[in-house]
Amino acid sequence: MKSFKKASEELQITKQTLTSWIEEINESHNIIWKNKTRYLDEIVINKLKQHKNIENKYTSSSGKDNIDLLEILQKENDLLVKQLSMKDEQINNLTRLIDQQQQLTISDKKEREELKYELKIALNQLEYSEKTSDYYEFEENERQDSSHHEYKDIQNTQTHKKSLWRYLFGK
C-alpha cells in the first residue's frame, strides 16, 4: 500500500491526474483513508501502471500523428499566408484603381465646369450680339421711320403749300 503522493510520484503524474485515472478505471472505491491521508492498494497501482502504459503507447503513436498533423497544419498555414498575400495584393490594386477613378472623376468634373463656363461665355456673347443687332435694327428702323416722316412732312408741306398757293393765286 502506497500513499497518494508516493503513487503519483512513481507514476510521474499529478495527484489530480491520479484521481482522474482512478475514476477512469472505476477504482475510486479502492481508495483507503487513514488519518486524513489517501492510500492506494498495489492492485490499483498495477492497474494504473497498465493504464499508463496504454496511455504512453497511445501518446507515442499520437506523437507520430502529431508530427503528421503539424506538417498538415504547416502546409495549410503556408497556403493561408499565400492567399493572404494575394488578397493584400488585390486590395492594393483595387485601392490604386479607386484612386485613379477618383482622379478621373475630379478631372471630368473640372472639365465639365470649364465647358459650362465656356458655354456661358458663348451664350452671353450671343445674347450681346443679338441685343446689339436688335439695337442697330431698331436704330435703323428709327432712322428710316424719321426720314420717311420727314419725306412725308416735306411732301405734305409742299402739297399744303401748293394748295395754299393755289388757293391764293388760283393755280
Image: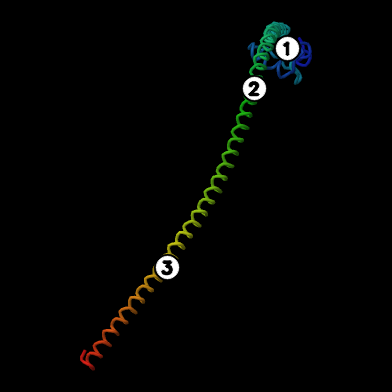
Q: In the picture provided, is 126 more to the left or to the right than 168?
A: right
Residue 144 or residue 64, whichever sits in front? 144
x, y percent for residue 5? 78, 16
Query: At label 1, which amino acid type do we have?
Result: Leu
Q: CA distance from mark 1 to mark 3?
A: 128 Å
x, y percent for residue 135? 42, 68
Name above or below for residue 58 compared with residue 92: above
Which residue is located at x 74 percent, y 18 percent? 15
Query: At label 2, which amino acid type do we have?
Result: Lys
Which mark, by number, is residue 82? 2
> Which quadrant would residue 20 be assigned to in this image?
top right
> Is residue 148 visible in this depiction of the protein?
yes
> Which quadrant would residue 32 be assigned to in this image?
top right
Residue 142 or residue 85, whichever sits in front? 142
Name above or below for residue 144 compared with residue 43: below
Which mark, by number, is residue 136? 3
- Marked residue nearer the N-terminal end (1 or 3): 1
x, y percent for residue 144? 36, 72
Q: CA distance from mark 2 to mark 1?
A: 56 Å
Specify the quadrant that holds the C terminus.
bottom left
Q: In the picture provided, is 130 more to the left or to the right than 55?
A: left
Q: Dot 3: few (<14), some (14–19), or many (≥20) neighbours within 10 Å?
A: few
Query: At label 3, which amino acid type do we have?
Result: Tyr
Which residue is located at x 45 percent, y 66 percent? 132
Q: CA distance from mark 3 to mark 2?
A: 80 Å
x, y percent for residue 4? 75, 15
